[in-house]
Amino acid sequence: MVLAEDRIVRVLRRGRAVGGFADVDGKRASEALERRAVRCGAEGVSPLHAAIIGSWTRSRSRLAAGIAFLLIGCTHIGPATVVRDRFDFGTAVAESWKQQTLLSIVKLRYLDVPVFLDVGQIVSSYELETGIDVSGQIAPVNRGDTFAGVGGRRVFTDRPTITYTPMTGATFLRGLISPIPTASILHTLQSGYAADFILGWTVESLNGLRNRSTAPGLSHEADPAFARALELMREIQMAGGINLGVEMDKDRGDVTVAVFRREDLSPSVSNKSTELRRLLGLPTEQQRFLVVTSPGRGANGELAIQPRSLLQVMQAAGMFVEVPPEHLARQWATPGVERPAEGDSAFRVRIRHSREKPANPYATVRYKDHWFWIDQSDWRSKRALGLVILLFTLIDTGGGERLPVLTIPTN
């Protein structure tokens, strides 16, 4: 037994790996083993035990250092959270906007009061705590057990704080019930929206021609001439024969105009342009008209538009909410309009209802024990809901520039 121990000690001195605990070659390692053997021999510890203890102790130190590096050396979490959280929080805010807007439209159909909450601030704080624990015991032969333990911990804490601001007050209500600025309506047309879609939702009358009424209990269909004017305007717009927009005048500032083109138009489009001006009571030979805000017919050279308020736009969308028959029987909701014809592109909106939650809706809310939702494939209804959300940002609702603020401190 003594001969075997001497051989192992010599192997350890030469730096060969024995169970992964040997140190590197060198005179200092050999001398350290001899000194440890002398000390342990005085205490009754064999040379083999002393060699293994020394080599194992150094290896344990290297192992602890390695674990500490893995736990503590990779704690740079700040930049990595931006990619994830910026889009996650942005998606969540967008989804909540859709649901809040849809719920408000449904509530207006039930003559309920819509409540709006704005996301004031988003603060997400991250904390990463790491640590390492090393423990053990070295005992002489026959006097106890020699053991060691190495452990680590890594704790990640996410503390998001979201602040909601109720949208109330005189300024907000005034922006909600005041007519949408004519310039904002024409700006949306300049951005590429279809004329029949924008004017069909945001205009109460067009040079005296009445749109469909949105007032609860006072609903009436649009004038046939109004529906025909929107249809002609869409076709002429697609052919590039009309431009409704905002121009900059050095004396008057922003000026809203409607310009009819004559050059490079097919005879069919030219005839439609002439028909549109006759329906609107405009001179057929004049090409440029000043767009003004008025509920009646404009003066000579003017095209009068009476815009709706944002509340009226939402009420108009609410008229197309499909209400459960039992709710109508109990008079919980106001009568709406029948589903529009396939050709009525300006009003092809459908907000459905069901007892069960739909599988994959574009937007859905629960109200009075029913789910009200817009189908993912119904792009016209999705476009109308998006317009209401867009109008919220175009009118003055007293919110100023209160955009969500994302702050991510890291510890």
Image (cartoon, grey):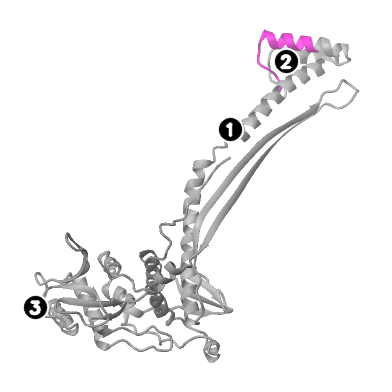
Q: Is residue 133 visible?
A: yes
What residue is pinned by disc 3? Answer: 285
Q: Nearer the viewer, residue 388 or 133?
A: 388
Q: How many marks?
A: 3
As helix, strand or loop, the secondary structure at mark 1 comes to loop
Which span of residues is magenta-colored?
20-36
Label 1 sits on what residue type?
A: Gly
What residue is pinned by disc 1? Answer: 73
Residue lying furthest right in this view?
142
Label 3 sits on what residue type?
A: Glu
Q: Earlier in the sequence, mark 1 or mark 3?
A: 1
Q: Earlier in the sequence, mark 2 or mark 1?
A: 2
Tell us which disc is closer to us: 1 or 3: 3
Q: Earlier in the sequence, mark 2 or mark 3?
A: 2
The answer to whether residue 163 is left or right of residue 281 is right
Q: Is residue 331 magenta?
A: no
